[in-house]
Image (tube, coloured by chain):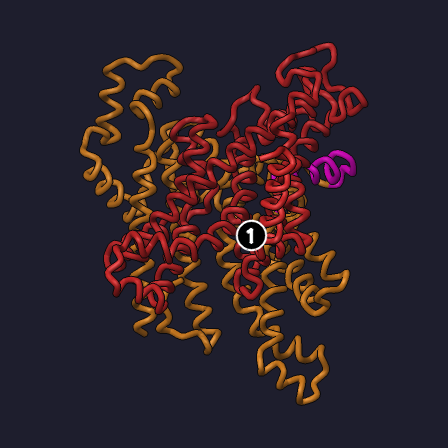
């Protein structure tokens, strides 16, 4: 096939994706477009960050300490003379990486638990749902704080703590979808034909829960970013000199009077990232399920972690 | 009645789970807690004799289920143990720090409700206009705002620049203002969205249309008819938000260096002071279960439409 042919194929594949009903709904949704752009920009910045800056995130220049924002240092320098903008760029990698990883683990645990509870029913369901209730009896950040603190302050333990305390909402959503699906005629028909359980789950149940789970995960990203930054701020996540945003804010607070940018630059970075994922999540929810009213309430927004 | 019993039973089960989790958490610790604590306390490697004595004194030699049983028995008698450091009684510590946190939580909830109900109602009534967009945009930013940064912004503006409020500590009303605004506005952002969507839903109910058809002015329809129903889920939400307030209080107390349950917990976590960690965790978990139970019961009392036989979500 000629080069132009391949390109044309690619283009038509791209066009097919862009014309998919869900994607079209997303493209028409201003909050999804805005959120998507913000998230895409941060992701690109995180990937190409080192190319954009002449500085090393950890190189100290004590002669240059606590410089206010300038052309050479758009977000100023910190107490060790490091370029704050560079550190934010490198920090985006930690923040995004952690958020995606934690959310993926939460999602996996939640989906598995929800499927088991919904499909097995009986005492298995009862036991798992009581476990969910127990976990929900604690504010997520308190439980994560205790788990991370007891395991010992590190980025890995923070991720672990955030993952094990935060899967409950996925489990609930998946479980109730499974219960609902089980009663649908096409699922019952499939079971009556003797299709094995696993096949029924994979062919009929999973595709139907995918939408709500993806929406939940997108909204969850923002919550994970906030929780991770908050716990790092308390000293339980990334340890200095790691350029994690919460950690940067935590060290910057000692220079509140003379160098408020040390607190404001990472704060702003966190808000933009969380705002982006929340906008995208809101947009996705509306695009995937325009009729779903109950999910529109503030309840699903990621703040509660 | 059977609903009440069922609800009580499930709360008891959850409460039991809360005690198991609270007790079990500290056993996640890598290494020997006796050694860790003694090393911290004495500032050097503890002697074997000290470790043995500490283990015996704290009952750490028993099998874990026995330790749990003893601990639970003590807890039920109101004995939460003693802090590993300074020998303070945990219950006394909790009671000493609790009032500051309650004060902060109460003030924050007041601020949140005072902002969220008017903002949510105006947003719903003027749906799709610029007022609605401004309100929704503001609450989205509020939801996305890390409260520790908001706290420092307020410190920079209200305390350092204006010099109106004290920066750190607790005790007077002036000390309460900035932390309560920090925590309250974050909560208001979540509540505003809920009030708006709840009212929008109610405004489409047939009985609201009926009120309109009877010729009632829109203002009367909203305030006399729709708002009462629409605020019901908001009541539940305020109850559920207690979790958010307690979680947020941890960070906000650290920002404003306010003595409270949050600062107590963070200090205990870094010092590996297990009895204090268990005490705070248990108090938070038990409070949350209790508040949930009460909100649920209040909700069923208030709303005749709620089916008492309904399944759990």
Residue A221 in the image, given as x and y percentages of width and height:
53, 43
From which residue to which does the magenta span run? B144-164
User: Is B169 covered by the magenta stretch?
Assistant: no
Report the magenta stretch's main SS: helix
Task: Identify the residue shown where x is 20% and y is 39%.
Answer: B65
Task: Identify the residue shown where x is 32% and y is 50%.
Answer: A131
Q: Is residue A17 visible?
A: yes
Q: Identify whether B55 is placed above or below B233.
A: above
Q: Is residue B179 visible?
A: no
**Which of B123/B301 is in front?**
B123
Residue A139 in the image, given as x and y percentages of width and height:
46, 47
Which residue, given by chain and number where applicable, does mark 1 sit on? A301
Number of labels in the image equals 1
Task: Identify the residue shown where x is 50% and y is 29%.
Answer: A237
Q: Residue furthest bottom?
A: B214
Chain B takes which shade in the image? orange
User: Is B158 covered by the magenta stretch?
Assistant: yes
- Helix, strand or loop under label 1: loop
Task: Identify the residue shown where x is 69% and y is 20%.
Answer: A78
Residue B285 in the image, given as x and y percentages of width and height:
40, 48
């Amino acid at each position: 096939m000629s080069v132009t042919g391949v390109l044309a194929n690619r283009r038509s594949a791209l066009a097919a994706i862009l014309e998919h009903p869900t994607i079209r709904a997303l493209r028409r949704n201003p909050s999804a477009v805005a959120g998507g752009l913000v998230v895409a920009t941060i992701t690109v910045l995180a990937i190409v960050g080192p190319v954009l800056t002449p500085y090393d995130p950890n190189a100290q220049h004590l002669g240059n300490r606590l410089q206010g924002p300038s052309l050479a240092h758009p977000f100023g320098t910190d107490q060790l003379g490091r370029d704050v903008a560079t550190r934010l760029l490198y920090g985006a990698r930690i923040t995004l990486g952690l958020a995606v990883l934690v959310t993926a683990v939460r999602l996996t645990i939640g989906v598995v638990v929800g499927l088991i509870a919904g499909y097995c029913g009986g005492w298995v369901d009862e036991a798992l749902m009581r476990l969910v209730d127990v976990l929900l009896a604690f504010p997520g950040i308190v439980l994560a704080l205790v788990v991370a603190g007891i395991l010992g302050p590190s980025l890995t333990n923070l991720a672990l703590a955030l993952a094990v305390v935060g899967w409950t909402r996925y489990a609930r959503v998946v479980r109730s979808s499974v219960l609902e699906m089980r009663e649908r005629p096409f699922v019952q028909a499939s079971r009556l034909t003797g299709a094995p359980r696993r096949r029924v789950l994979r062919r009929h149940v999973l595709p139907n829960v995918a939408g709500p789970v993806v929406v939940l995960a997108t909204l969850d990203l923002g919550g994970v970013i906030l929780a991770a930054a908050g716990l790092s701020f308390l000293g339980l996540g990334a340890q200095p000199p790691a350029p994690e945003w919460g950690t940067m804010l935590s060290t910057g607070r000692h220079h509140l009077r003379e160098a408020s940018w040390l607190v404001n630059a990472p704060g702003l970075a966190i808000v933009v990232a969380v705002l982006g994922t929340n906008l995208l999540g809101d947009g996705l929810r509306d695009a995937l399920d325009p009729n779903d009213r109950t999910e529109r309430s503030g309840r699903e927004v990621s703040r509660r972690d | 009645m059977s609903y009440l019993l069922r609800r009580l039973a499930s709360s008891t089960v959850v409460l039991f789970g809360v005690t198991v989790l609270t007790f079990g958490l500290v056993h996640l610790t890598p290494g020997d807690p006796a050694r860790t604590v003694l090393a911290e306390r004495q500032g050097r490697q503890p002697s074997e004799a000290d470790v043995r004595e500490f283990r015996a004194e704290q009952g750490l030699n028993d099998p874990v289920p026995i330790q749990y049983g003893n601990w639970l028995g003590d807890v039920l008698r109101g004995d939460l143990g003693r802090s590993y450091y300074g020998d303070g009684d945990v219950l006394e510590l909790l009671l000493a720090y609790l009032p500051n946190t309650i004060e902060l939580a109460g003030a924050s909830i007041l601020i949140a409700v005072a902002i969220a109900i008017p903002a949510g109602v105006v947003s719903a009534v003027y749906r799709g206009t610029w007022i609605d967009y401004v309100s929704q945009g503001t609450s989205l930013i509020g939801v996305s705002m890390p409260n520790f940064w908001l706290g420092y912004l307020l410190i920079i503006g209200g305390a350092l620049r204006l010099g109106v409020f004290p920066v750190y500590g607790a005790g007077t009303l002036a000390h309460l203002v900035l932390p309560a605004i920090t925590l309250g506005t974050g909560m208001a952002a979540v509540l505003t969205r809920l009030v708006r969507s709840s009212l929008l839903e109610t405004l489409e109910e047939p009985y609201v249309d009926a009120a309109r058809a009877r010729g009632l002015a829109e203002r009367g329809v909203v305030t006399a008819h729709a708002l009462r129903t629409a605020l019901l889920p908001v009541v539940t939400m305020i109850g559920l938000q207690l979790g958010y307030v307690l979680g947020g209080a941890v960070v906000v107390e650290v920002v404003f260096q306010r003595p409270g349950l949050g600062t107590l917990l963070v200090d205990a976590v870094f010092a590996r002071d297990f009895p204090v960690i268990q005490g705070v965790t248990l108090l938070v978990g038990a409070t949350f279960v209790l508040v949930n139970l009460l909100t649920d019961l209040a909700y069923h009392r208030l709303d005749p439409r709620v089916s008492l036989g309904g399944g759990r979500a």
